Image: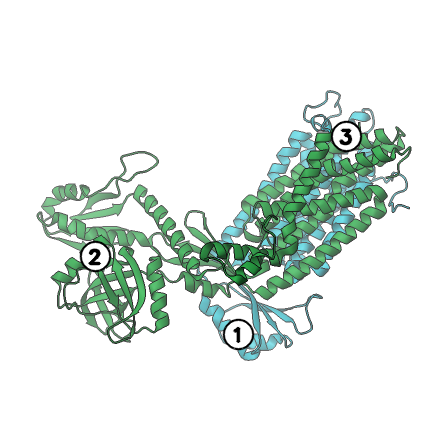
Amino acid sequence: MRLRLFKEAPNFDFFSHWKIWLGVSGLLMVVAFASFMVQGLNYGIDFRGGTTIRSESPMAVDIAAYRGAIDTLELGDITITEVFDPSFREDQNVAMIRIQAQDGQEAVTTDVIAAVETALQTVRPDIKFTSVESVGPKVSGELIQTAVIAVVLAIGAVLIYIWLRFEWQFAAGAVLALVHDVILTIGIFSELQIRFDLAIIAALLTIVGYSLNDTVVVFDRVRENLRKYKKRDLKDVLNLSINETMARTFMTSFTTLIALIALFVLGGDVIRGFVFAMIWGVIVGTYSSIFVASAILLYLGVKRDWTKPDANTGNQYANIDA
Amino acid sequence: MLQIDLWKRILIALTCALGVWLALPNAFYGPVEQHNDAVAAIELSGSTETLEAQKALWPDWMPSQLVNLGLDLRGGAHLLAEVKVEDVYANRMAAQWPEVRDALRDLTPVRRQQSPDDELRVRLNDPSKMAEAMEIVRGLARPVPTLTGAGSTDISVRGEDGMIIVTLSEAEKQATDERTMQQSLEIIRRRIDEVGTREPTIQRQGADRILIQVPGIGSAAELKEIIGTTAQLTFSPVVSRGSDANANPGIGNKLIPSVDEPGAFYVVESAPVVTGEELVDAQPSFDQNGRPAVSFRFNTSGARKFGDYTAANIGSPFAIVLDDEVISAPTIQSHIPGGSGIITGNFDVETSTNLAILLRAGALPAGLEFLEERTIGPELGQDSIDAGKVATVVAFVAVLFFMFVSYGLFGVFANIALIINVAMIFGLLSLVGATLTLPGIAGIVLTVGMAVDANVLIFERIREELKTAKGPARAISLGYEKALSAIIDANITTLITAVILFVMGSGPVRGFAITLGFGIVTSVFTAIFVTRLMVVIWFERARPKTIEV
């Protein structure tokens, strides 16, 4: 007995409403972008400077009391959030305190941190500070810059690679799909106000990698089928290729998702945002390979004469013999 | 065709075995770590019974390289410091002043003027001698060896309404910056080593930054204390003593507070007699009254300067200045020829010991500004490790199960390959001494999910080829052949993003990029070589007429 999603190769028609799907994707991107513009991201200290203190106490977190203790120090904008996690012990009550970067101070001051810690200790004498992180505004500015460059570089490098291995229409489709994924991910982070820090950039790049992986597998099959069925309509060829790779797409997305969900539930709160971004990315990335990347390919049209085998395609690798 | 040469089979098997072998110590992290520490301790300070016992926890002939745990897993402190390289320019100019004054002494009297830190402005009493004076000052310039070639000197001199302005040349500034950075790195390293913590990372970042990571230390504040303030020790001539914090010290002098006498301020000359750079040794000791003090010794040139100065200034006070505070201002009783002396002040044993360490390690040539500091408590790190372990195991088991129910025997092959794959990631990480961070664990979990992709591609292809009924052998071999281009393309693109992450990222993100990158390489290897080998061996033995994938 095998577990099989499809007994036969599926035969869904993905492209009967392809323009609508492209429209929906476009609309989603606009919504995501609008959310980003209106709400903005909930940047972590990596990107806007400041200090976060993670506190742990056997007694319940009393946000009002914490705030009262810290407010007397007049440190400006302070956020205190209680953290919940299934992996915490009974007597483990965790709160995150975030303090904005202090005006006119490039460097981080130990005094401020010490003052906050002392203030909290008056409220909860047994409080422990399990992590304290401070980033100066100078570094955070540079980190944003580096992050943006990294994402742009990754997308650019991929554009060139796919262009070389396929055709420019494929590259355009793949890259638009990537942009779609990145924008939607930023959109969900802004909409849900999940903390956006350095690790999320890593997640974004992983999403880029994953989405691409998926897109390339579909494209590879499209290329193969274009050679096989020279006379068939491009729409049919795309549909056939996606249906043929459907089982694989489902398997891989599913195994990746179960691994990520395990991490999301059990991996602790420190990396939960990071894992959330990746789960979202896997879903969006799978969707975009079909409804964005392939739809763009259909829109742009593609060279149909593949008779002269490209020196770059499969052959040189296909002969590798283990 | 389903044939693999014997030598290739052996090579594949050996590669897998090597990966597992290298990964093995990580399964026994605690004992191996103790073993490694014991080996290091024995090498350093000889053997003891406890050390030998710890050493015996892990056999010597086994590999003992471990994956380093990042700060977010082990706990510790992280600092990013910017070295204020410009600080040194002011000192350079202060040292240049007596030289210029002496050189011009026979020509015309000169006065030092107020100037920016990296300039020396000198007014000539007799402006008509400007040209001559400039010639003389230019003669003081020394050549700077640069990459771009000869011709550069350390100072440039220009004249401006009766003033000679001496500035450092660009080449000299660059050379000075470079020296400042090297010195700072070396001094920070020595200070941290004096405390003796495990595997600190002290790295230069960019032009003027230093990254310091010390596992196992309580907090970033503690680490800052060890690195210390600059510990700039100077012996400076005292001009006057007063209690006015706003007194005008006059040009070429500076006003600094006293440590021990609240409200007291000294005016000292900016150009010191001797600096801490010329110290060769400093030890905690006691003065004649039995109070804690610090004894010190100068090198030859320092000893000579100190000797000359004390001989010429018997009866006048001089100040021992540490980081712009006067520690003590004794009066010179007699000529001190040997270049050694003792600093007394309001010390206890601990402060005198600390001061001696700071002095011995040498002064930081320039101030440090901390741009980023992170402290991660060991409990949080341990919690993260525990959570990460549970999550990885659950993810692993779920994926193994899912692969088995989907592909049966072939799924088992893929699962064995997956286990080898994860072992190889750990083997590679240990081999290159990479650091495992929390996002790195996420990278491994992600790899577990994605690593099956290559196998899934192949198996699905074999299923497809089976439908066109070419016989199992042909279907398997076609499946591998046709899936290959998709596997290569898909993984190269992911590898590109991993490489970019590695190059651009830092800290935990870089740890993630490393595990992701290694995961891609090993998963492709295991899919196209290891599973294939297993399939081929099984096929040769069983010779099935039909197969079900």
| B90 is higher (above) or lower (below) than A240 | below
Where residue B279 sits, quadrant-wise, is bottom left
Q: Position of residue B120 (x, y in %)?
A: 23, 51
The chain whose colour is green is: B
What is the secondary structure assignment of the residue under circle 2? helix
**Which residue corresponds to the image point at 12% horizontal and 48% vertical from the top-left?**
B104
Mark 3 in CB contact with mark 1 (< 8 angstroms): no
Chain of residue at mark 1 = A
Marks 3 and 1 on same chain: no
Residue B522 lies, with reference to residue B228, above or below; the image says above
Is disc 2 on the same chain as disc 1?
A: no
Residue under label 3, please give it.
Answer: B481
Furthest-top residue in view?
A308
Q: Which residue is mark 1?
A: A70
* Tag 1 near tag 2, CB within 8 Å: no
The residue sitting at 67% across, 39% down in the picture is: B15
**Mark on residue B303?**
2
Which sits in the foreground, B87 or B408? B408
**Is A53 left, or right, of B292 in this rendering?**
right
Q: Amino acid at mark 1?
A: Ile
Q: Which chain is cyan?
A: A
Instruction: Work out which quarter of the rendered image holds the C terminus of chain B and state it.
Output: top right
Q: Position of residue A249 (x, y in %)?
A: 78, 42
The colour scheme used here is by chain
| Nearer the observer, B449 or B496 | B449
Residue B504 at least partly seen: yes
Mark 2 belongs to chain:
B
Q: What separation in Å lies between label 3 and label 1 (alpha carbons)?
A: 65 Å
Point out the residue furthest to the front here.
Answer: B49
**Image-based side of B361 in relation to A8, left or right:** left
The three-letter code of the residue at mark 3 reads: Glu
